Amino acid sequence: MLDYSHYQVEDFVMDKSFRKWILESDVHSNLIWEAWLKDNASKADDVREAQRILLSMARHDFQVSTDLQDEIWNNIITSEDSIKTEPKVIPMGPHSVIGNYPDKKKYNFKKYWYSVAAAVLILIGVGVFYISSVEFDQEKEVALVTIEKQNPRGQKSTVFLPDGSKVFLNSESSLTYQSNYNESDRRVNLIGEAFFEVAKDPNRPFIVETKYLNTTALGTSFNVKTAGDQSCKVSLLTGKVKVELNGPISDKEILLPGEEINYRLGDKELEKKDFDIETAALWRKGIIYLEDTPFRESLELMENWYNVTFIIEGELPQGLQCTGRFENAYLSNVLSSLGYALDFEYEIEGKKVRLMFNSQNPSL
């Protein structure tokens, strides 16, 4: 927060943050200004007068013109009583905060309002004085931006959201959210895979949007994985979430810990099934976990994990499956273990890995 300790009334009137607090109050700004006034009680009278000016002017629809500027000037100088009229405001807003401080200060009215009038006219002249709540909403919309966190193949990251929620973002995945995140809800969009540890906030639902499924939680941990345009899986580790189909077909399910939804393109409804919490989402801890995983699927996982491309030489045996647990392991260690079990040899050449099979009958 800026240093407002030297501000006079006209400075508060011209300050964008102060105007937004008075004219478009929210809980966050109330807490900030309430804390500041506790530390700067001597400025309460200046704050109160600036509030009266802004609220009195907010009753009018201003058009920037020379005649109107002259009228404003004259009204400010001659209409002390109208300025002092207490406006109606929403309880628990700026009025309540400022009302905690007695009105003690007496102003040299003529000298004081000359400076305030000049500040008001400057604001109108440069076109930055937004009076109506609609205009403030428009200002918000203009300032709204999309924030994106993206990982290429071979890279993982941890994303901390503004509300304190933590997201483990897998490789070849992206997470996006708007700059107004955490105002009315907490909404993110995911492509790829991520594990979410959601900060508890019963007043603001946490929503993960994917192409096919929307997952809503309040305070919980769960994994969401999309596979291109083909499927999406939601696995719940703690808490409770609601999973809804995002499309023309309406269906939803409530998940409890140990339950997951695995939706595939073309499915007409959502189906729950159980999974092993102990082995779920181990990727976030740097662990590759394979349990009777089809060979092609295992290769795709390792291509993503290590940012390599596999080239298979010879005929690939049918029905190959991989099993193993590898914690922060080098690619060579993983391939050595799998090669021994599935009877293949390998060569790593930069980002290319050649797999040469020696037998049609590997043992797991």
Image (cartoon, rainbow, N blue to C red):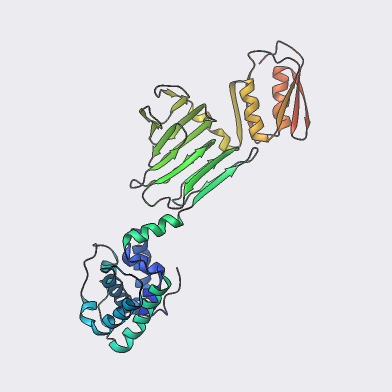
Where is residue 105 drawn, in percent x and y?
Answer: 28, 84
Q: Is residue 299 left or right of residue 60?
A: right
Q: Quadrant of residue 305?
A: top right
Does the image show residue 68?
yes
262 relative to 14, above or below = above
Q: Quadrant of residue 131?
A: bottom left
Where is residue 22 drawn, in percent x and y?
Answer: 32, 67
- Residue in the image at 27% along x and 69% along y: 60
174 relative to 87, above or below = above
- Residue in the image at 37% along x and 77% along y: 121
Q: Nearer the viewer, residue 348 or 290?
A: 348
Most distant residue in the top direction:
361
Q: Nearer the viewer, residue 302 or 212?
A: 212
Which quadrant holds the N terminus? bottom left
43 relative to 169, above or below = below
Which quadrant holds the C terminus? top right
Where is residue 44 drawn, in percent x and y?
Answer: 32, 76
Give the number of callouts: 0
Q: Quadrant of residue 192?
A: top right
225 relative to 168, above or below = above
Where is residue 36 drawn, in percent x and y?
Answer: 38, 70
- Residue in the image at 74% along x and 30% along y: 332
Does the image show residue 323?
no
Q: Nearer the viewer, residue 279 or 261?
A: 261
